[in-house]
Amino acid sequence: MESQRLMMVPVGCMEKQRKNRKRGGSDLHSVLCMQGGDDDGSYAKNSEAPASAIALAEPLLVDALLNAMTAIKTGDMSIESSDTAVVRIADLGCATGLNTLATVDLIVRTLQQRRRFCSGMEFEAFFADLPSNDFNSLFRLLPPLSLSDSEDADADEDGRRYYAAGVAGSFYGRLFPKRSIHVAVSLSALHWLSQIPKRVLQKSSGAWNKGRAWIDGAEADVVAAYARQSEEDLLAFLRCRREEMVEGGLLFLLMAGRDGSQGAENQLGDPESRAKHPFTSSMDEAWRDLLNEGLIDEEMRDTFNIPAYMRSIEEVRRAFDECGGFEVKRAEYERIIEHSREKQEQWIRSPVSYGKAKANLVRATLKPIIEAHIGPALSEEFFNRFEKRVSEDIGMLHKTCFYGVIVVVAIKK
């Protein structure tokens, strides 16, 4: 009886999903967002990996900000030497949860550490993301405003020392007036593309990504299409920031990336990471389960592609060189471990818990676009299959997955 019920799920929505697919990747901005809310499947509860990456990059950000203090003092960042000067900070691709708030708080408090550089200055923070982002959940986490005149930046540890505003729009387009932003950061967001390359969505194309949801290990034409889209997107991002940032402004980027010694077809580096990453084997197996059970057809499976691309440092530097207007101070590649050894040992003892945690991670990052592709009912069936696949693969629990990240510090000329 249950199998009969499942077989009926796609009947009423199959045609609707085909119509949605014909629109291609141009509407991605309306559904690509981290899962909102604060339940077990939300991004707020499943952003441990981004938090680890931010913690890794934090010393570089602090160092860059301390160097920027001198620029602020001398006026290189176009801040007038008045008692009402405002430092404007933009977090581009802020998502939701505490990561973005902690980053902005770090920026403000770092710049306040030496009050002689910032006497009389006020701070304004813009949290920018796509209109589909859950800004309500983010703003509910904001601490109360506290603009104490105390010389001690830590006098009110729980207070917010900046004015806050939300900005809805793609960071691949203009978001702010010219020469208005002093510090711009983008943390764990720039590996998301503006759209799926059109050729990947054309069944007659050599870039048709049959049988897989992502490009790791894909055919050369598929990888090349993603690489071109990535190049166009990063260049568009930098050109917009070039217009929006003041002279001497600080641009700090943290994005998923890959080792430059690896070709773009190898997005994840070592074999264990390639096998265990949530975008790869378990993902493809879950889609194949829906197909084999008759819940979706091949076209529905093959037209789902994850809009993410891990750049190399060489690709990032090439974009900066082509854009112009920035001086790259640092560009580094690092790897972070998926989770602690203690947590891995805990999950080895409880594979079901690991499957649930992994499924929640995928929900947090991909549920909105999966749901837009196949509908809410089938979306839940997909996550159930994904969780089951992960829970049953005991050997995978003993593998270690690493995430590659690229950190860039650049100054607007």
Image: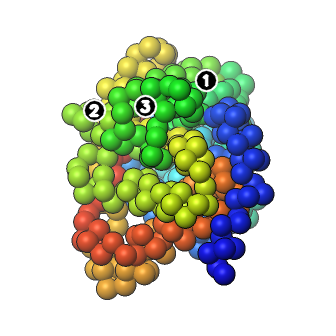
Place residue 194 in its image quadrant: top right
- The relative height of residue 42 versus residue 65 in the rendered view (above or below) is below
Mark 2 — residue? 263
Residue at image location 51% in from the left, 60% down from the top: 292
Place residue 159 in its image quadrant: bottom right
Closest to the camera, between mark 1 and mark 2, is 2
Which kind of residue does numbered mark 3 sit on?
Val
Q: Counting other residues with Cα less than 10 Å from the Cα at mark 1, is it few (<14), some (14-19), or many (20 or more)?
A: some
Residue at image location 61% in from the left, 55% down from the top: 296
Residue at image location 63% in from the left, 34% down from the top: 25
Which kind of residue does numbered mark 1 sit on?
Cys
- Please provide percent x and percent y for residue 147: 70, 56
Mark 1 — residue? 240
Towards the viewer: 27 or 253: 27
Mark earlier in primary sequence (1, 2): 1
SS at mark 2? loop
Whether residue 352 is visible, yes or no, is yes
- Please provide percent x and percent y for residue 74: 51, 26
Q: Counting other residues with Cα less than 10 Å from the Cα at mark 2, is it few (<14), some (14-19), or many (20 or more)?
A: some
Label 2, label 3: how many angstroms apart (C-alpha)? 13 Å
